[in-house]
Image: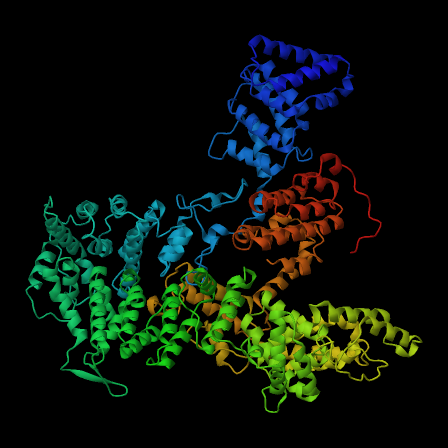
Amino acid sequence: MHENKEKKSEALEEAFCSVICHTAETERWKRENSAEKLKNVLSNVPQESLDVALKTYIQCIPVCEALLNNDQIHYSKQHMWVTTFKLIRKIIGGVDYKGCRDLLRVILDKCQMIPAIGNVSIMPQIECVINLITYILDRNACLLPAYLAVNEITKVCPEDKVWPHWKMGKILSNFVNSFRLTAQMVTVSGRADLLPIVGHSLATCLVWRLNSSNLKFPLNGPLPYDRDLHEPQTGLLRYVLEQPYSREMVGNMLGLNKQVKQRCEVLEEQLVNLVVMAMEKSEKDDASSDEGLSQLLWQHLSSQVIYFVLFQFASFPHMVMSLYEKLKGRNLNKGRDHLMWVLLQFISGSIQKNPLKDFLPVMKLYDLLYSDTSAIPMPDVNKSQSTHAVASTCIWIHLNKKAQTDKVKLCRPIPFALHEHMEYLKQSLNNKNLSLNDYKIALLCNAYSTNNEFFNLPMGKLVESIYGDSKHTTLLPGNIVASAPTQPLPMSLLDSLTVHAKMSLIHSIVHRVIKQAKAKQTVALAPALVETYSRLLVYMEIESLGIKGFISQLLPTVFTSHAWGILHTLLEMFSYRLHHTQAHYRVQLLGHLHTLASVQQTNQNHVESTALRLITGLGSAEVQPQLSRLFSEPNRPGFLSGESEELNRALVLTLARAMHVTGVETFSSSWFRDILMQIMQSTPHSWPENTLKCMANEGDIIAHFSMQGTPPLFLCIVWKNLLEENRIPPTAYKVLDRLGPRTLSSHLRTFADYMVYELSLTGVSGQNVNKYIDTLNDMVWRCNILTIDRLVLCLALRNLDENEARLCYLIIHMLLLKPSEFKSRVQDFVKENSPEHWLQNNWHEKHMTFHRKYSEKFYYEGIQDLNSPIQHQYLPVYFGNVCLRFIPYFLNLVNNRKSVNSIFLHLTIFLLSIIVLDILIHHHPITYVYNTLHYYQKHLIQLALQDIRQNNWFLSEDYQQFIQSDSLDWVPDLNYYVKLVGRLVDTILGKTPSPFPNCDWRFNEFPSPAAHALYATCVELMSLPVRGEIDSYWFSLNLKIVEVIQTPLSHDLGSAQPFQLYNFQTCQTLFLRECLRPIIKTEEQFLYLCHLVGPFLQRLNSEKTRCLLELVIEIYEILVNVDKCCEHLHYMEPITDFLYHIKYMFVGDGVKNEVEKIIRNLRQALQLRLRFISHINIEEAMTPMTPLSVPLSS
């Protein structure tokens, strides 16, 4: 009765809680009353049951929180401190894992107040805290995921701060260090030492991403990664900056966006460091050094500085001041002129649009570098280096001109050391007879490009030398009259001009071309002008007026003016003169060309030729980023041809090549499916979808397709109709019946070619292929239009080239193995029958049972009009069925292997895996298999010896000796491979002298020395006359992984531990499921798998999320195999930490439902540790599993 009253009073209090006023006296009474009630309840509980009673009657988390939040808790109050932590130790087992995490954070915060080195009197306080923390961190107690615990420890006690008392710090550090094995598994081995190859490595890949504020790797999770991964990767950024054509990769590494103006100080610092390092190199150069290479180096540095300062990623005044600080006291006089040349490039082009104060810090460099007491002699103007030597004087002239324009006065005169340079330039202005035989014109252009009064003379001389006049002409092929000048401006002269001068020159040329296009002059452009213009287009620092203006302004203007001769000239320039044009410009030009193709007056052959070059020239790594981006834009350029089937076919082949090389087919495939669909709409490679609809009536349809001489296309139309509408009109049955078997064979041959053709358009992956095969399967089994044996025979015997044969065999493979119809028939027949038919006495019974279950139809019963069926007489069948009839067709399929080479064995293996027992019915099965594999083995060896390249300029010395010999029998030793790879490494690291000849990379096939070395090395390796893998990259890599896992090394490690063995510095889901899962049985093998997968988790999460989810499920499945095969697991903690890392950093609850079922099949200790992933309660996890009644397979 008393209890009911209490409940009612509590209910009333809750109902009126918003209006009841609680005084301090009532609150005190409630606390005392509640405490008294609790004492009364617990006083009757036996001592041995007290812990259970506390957990039953008291919620642990609010008690623990109240205790820790008490202001009286301080380590100096020993009794209060010790009893508090002892009580928490007793009841914390009843707190859920999130509560334990929060309590651990508070406890660690409390411990921060304890001195790192205290006297012995506070040891009891420390011991009680250590006792509690040890219990929380105990992996066997499993109060919370260890991963969450280490996260709290690293937040409260980071490496750069003082840790708690040394005794407690030891426990925490040991716990953190236990995660080093997990950190190793998820780290790319030697990551801090890896370098990308600019021009080959994906510029948009996240692998090389760095923090833009400190240049550190973005590391996932609270793991204790190796110290070198926490260091700023200045060397990596500096290396990439040194490479030509690297600015896109730099922007991606640092996450820079040209649309957002943001200063990146670390980038700015490395640009300064590169300039200083180049100056140091100049000090070491002697007279024998290659002057051209030095010129190219400073040309590249000036291009990088201009780009990053122009987009405000670096601040010019800050860079100048940083240079001043780094050069103080260095005495780098040999490099000072080169430095001023770099600064001149930016100053001359930007000083007119920016305030003078932004450039005045350069004055400090004059004080530092040009404090000579005597005048510096004027350099020899016959050498290009003279333009660098006079750069400092040119800067002064620009600064002085800006001061005059702003009506201010420079506070100082030009340094005395530069007086002779200044006087020479002033005197040269009076010389009206300037010559192109020296660099005097370049000096004047560089000095006065911001002063039109003096600039027009030297620039006029340049343009005059390439323009020509109407009085002097020359002839082009076809007796075309052109302006006379034929000698272009040399690259050495163009390199000696500042960016501002080159911009003026290219602007003048473009204006001249547009003027001539609009005037429709009959005299063609001068060869000198065209060649000079093409040379100017290679300079990335004048991109806006260069290639961008060429694509966006000049080409459309010339087209609009109908200046077809000039248009042809521009396309020739692009085809035969330009190198390393950025991909988005090439795709944009492709759109222009498709527009041009619609105009009759244009030279269709040349337009198509240029378009074909653009399509086939797309790099494999460029295709997916460019085309998928453009295809998703609402106002995308038309990069697909609306008229040329050949160009669209070339694009399809380029897509296929890119997908094969880069593995992009495993990404989202919607982008290329959309492209292929639009190609089919633009240039249909088959007959229109409305062919039947255009016919007048049914009689016309039947008559049209059954008359002699009509193209044998009807099966193609039937397939297309079934594909798109999932039905076939009854009229089709009448056409098929009228055609008859003989005529239908001709239609079947055409249809086989058509299927191969369709598959070549769509590629070998994606939903379209599956839909195509499903439709073909319906024609066989649902509609009874074709028989499987006849179809396979026709497909196998078509006269196709190797690539088409591969596609043909792929159709056969998918048709036989993907749908269930054929497989189920074979399996049922083999299960019920034996090849020893002479021993059977119930053949007919089984024969009829099979036919009743799988009745066979030969007269299109699946599609005929049931209202007016046509009757056909079936012949009696005593023994045959589809399985037995297929045997000779299968033999023929294999015997036709000569046309398919390497894919034959893979198809055979797949087919044998399904119908191997069926083959036993054949009377010579062993002879057949022996002959087949023997032939294939021989043919594989022949493949390995063919197509040996004999190009000497990029091959190693050993290989050149080999190809000069008469024998093809050469097995290189290990030293050969060491030297070959060493040549590549030396090139990447910039070793001098370079293993490859130095060249101007602006005009080379590859954009950088490292890219050239990589491709040269790969070609040589692929040409070796040794047996190698001829399958795809993934297949070869997968075989190597399987080989390593199966090697005895992973079973018998000797004194080495697995984590020592797999620390290499000292995926595919299907591959894991089908290849690795069956063979991974040991803990060491599983750890090897973790080391393979772990480093790529971040990239998988960013690029292939769905694949990551599937991969994680497979890892759990493999763990179940290992768990069942191993009596003891020695690395349980690193393995579970690895799985928690995947959960908290990548997949979250994305695979929760799938892995929960899998975890329940693990041993008790693993279930306990993984219970926060599977949400198995601790009592269930502690319950031993019921032994399996079926013995485990080995």
Q: Quadrant of residue 803?
A: bottom right
Residue in front for this viewpoint, 334 or 773: 773
> Residue visible at 29% across and 78% down?
564
From the top left corner, tell me how far across and down residue 323 is, in percent.
26, 47
Q: Is residue 570 above or below residue 17?
A: below
Q: Is residue 663 visible?
A: no
Of 223 and 424, nearer the camera is 223
Quarter of the figure that contains the N terminus: top right
Residue 1185 position by quadrant: top right
Query: Residue at the top extreme?
Result: 25
Q: Give x and y (percent) for residue 582.
A: 37, 64
The percent position of residue 534, horizontal first and vertical second, equals 28, 71
Quadrant where the C terminus lies?
A: bottom right
Using residue 1092 as the reference point, say whether residue 260 is left or right of it.
Answer: left
Q: Report x, y in % for residue 243.
A: 37, 59
The answer to whether 72 appears left or right of 352 in the picture is: right
From this view, report whether residue 476 is shown above or below residue 84.
below
Is 797 left, or right, of 946 in this rendering? right
Q: Which residue is most to the right?
A: 841
Depth check: 309 or 597 in front?
Answer: 597
Q: Residue at x 59, y 12 (%)?
A: 27
Query: What sort of colour scheme is used for the picture?
Result: rainbow
